[in-house]
């Protein structure tokens, strides 16, 4: 079978849609469809069922996938053992991260890193949901929970601090907050409970159960902007809120939460030069910003 057609097969099997597979392969979606048709003709059977929400593997496709993945792994081992040229880092690396961390901390540094390596393409998926390494949605994933599925290299990237914040204007217009009991009657901004993508985001339950919300959002950036606008109080990452002079921390000794970011990548790709380079770069970048990520509670 044609290896190029098999590459297209794997991307479609993992992504589930022609458009997603096309983006990963940097081609038009019609090219993906044409390759799949050629492979199915060669195999003499349908490998995907076409459904309203995408493409799903047939039984023949499910039998074929592990064999193609074994071929892919063998190819990657050969690639990783091949001495690199003087052309520098090349290829695509897709990084999945939580929205706030990816947007505020990683994006500026990754953009500058990519500038230094013109033949390297970095996709940053900074999203308010879990990016799945096991589904190959990304090559490197930074998550709030330590991955427990699949053969992967996993490291603790960093701890970070979250605090209760409100704008100076909001605090000037409402009763002061000196104790947890003083939170009664205040308006809050938070996540949408039934859309939380990690149990690590349930920090408000540890502190106080609000009676009223001005806004609930799946986006931490939206929550931050609502707090800046003076709409209420929210638990925000210190790396987002602390630099903003319009915001004040509330109850810093009592409302001081610590969470952890974990970084992972597939075991089979750890020897790739571009993967090792970005993995090390991310660790160094985050280590250099440790003071802004992990802020101790005042005595």
Image (tube, rainbow, N blue to C red):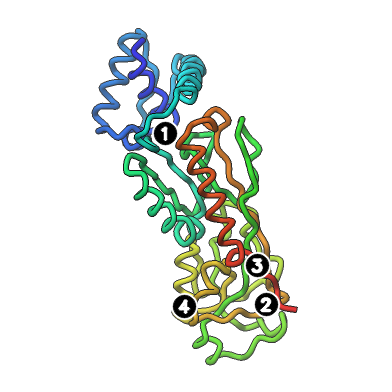
Residue appearing at x 46%, y 15% in the figure: 64
**Quick check: marks 2 and 1 in contact, CB under 8 Å?**
no
For disc 1, the marked residue is: 15
Q: Earlier in the sequence, mark 2 or mark 1?
A: 1
Q: Earlier in the sequence, mark 3 or mark 1?
A: 1
Nearest the eye: 132 or 272? 272
Q: Earlier in the sequence, mark 1 or mark 4?
A: 1
Q: Earlier in the sequence, mark 4 or mark 2?
A: 4
Residue 158, located in which quarter of the rendered image? Answer: bottom right
Q: How many marks?
A: 4
Number of residues whose C-alpha sits closer than 10 Å to that of mark 2, classed few (under 14), some (14–19) or many (20 or more): some
Residue appearing at x 49%, y 69% in the figure: 223
For disc 4, the marked residue is: 228
Q: Which mark is residue 204?
A: 3
Q: Is residue 185 visible?
A: yes
Nearest the eye: 91 or 149? 91
Asked which secondary structure carries label 2, the reply is loop
Number of residues whose C-alpha sits closer than 10 Å to that of mark 4, classed few (under 14), some (14–19) or many (20 or more): many
Where residue 159 appears, as percent x and y from the top left, is 65, 58
Asked which secondary structure carries label 3, the reply is helix
For disc 2, the marked residue is: 252
């Amino acid at each position: 079978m044609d290896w190029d057609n098999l590459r297209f097969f794997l991307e479609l099997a993992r992504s589930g849609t022609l458009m997603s597979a096309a983006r990963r392969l940097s081609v038009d979606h019609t090219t993906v469809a044409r390759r799949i048709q050629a492979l199915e003709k060669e195999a003499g059977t349908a490998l995907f069922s076409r459904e309203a929400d995408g493409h799903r593997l047939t039984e023949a496709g499910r039998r074929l996938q592990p064999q193609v993945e074994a071929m892919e792994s063998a190819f990657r081992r050969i690639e990783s053992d091949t001495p690199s040229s003087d052309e520098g880092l090349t290829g695509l690396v897709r990084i999945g991260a939580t929205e706030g961390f990816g947007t505020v901390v990683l994006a500026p540094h990754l953009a500058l890193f990519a500038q230094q390596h013109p033949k390297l393409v970095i996709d940053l998926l900074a999203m308010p949901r879990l990016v799945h390494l096991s589904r190959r949605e990304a090559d490197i994933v930074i998550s709030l929970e330590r991955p427990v599925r699949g053969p992967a290299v996993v490291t603790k990237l960093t701890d970070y601090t979250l605090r209760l914040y409100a704008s100076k204007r909001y605090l000037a217009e409402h009763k002061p907050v000196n104790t947890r009991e003083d939170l009664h009657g205040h308006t809050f901004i938070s996540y949408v409970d039934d859309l939380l993508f990690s149990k690590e985001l349930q920090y408000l339950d540890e502190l106080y159960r609000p009676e009223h919300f001005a806004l609930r959002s799946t986006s931490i950036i939206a929550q931050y902007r609502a707090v800046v606008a003076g709409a209420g109080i929210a638990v925000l990452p210190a790396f987002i809120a602390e630099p903003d002079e319009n915001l004040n921390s509330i109850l810093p000794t009592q409302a001081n939460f610590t969470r952890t970011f974990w970084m992972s990548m597939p075991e089979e790709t750890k020897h790739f030069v571009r993967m090792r380079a970005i993995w090390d770069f991310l660790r160094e970048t985050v280590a250099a910003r440790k003071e802004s990520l992990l802020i101790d509670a005042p005595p």
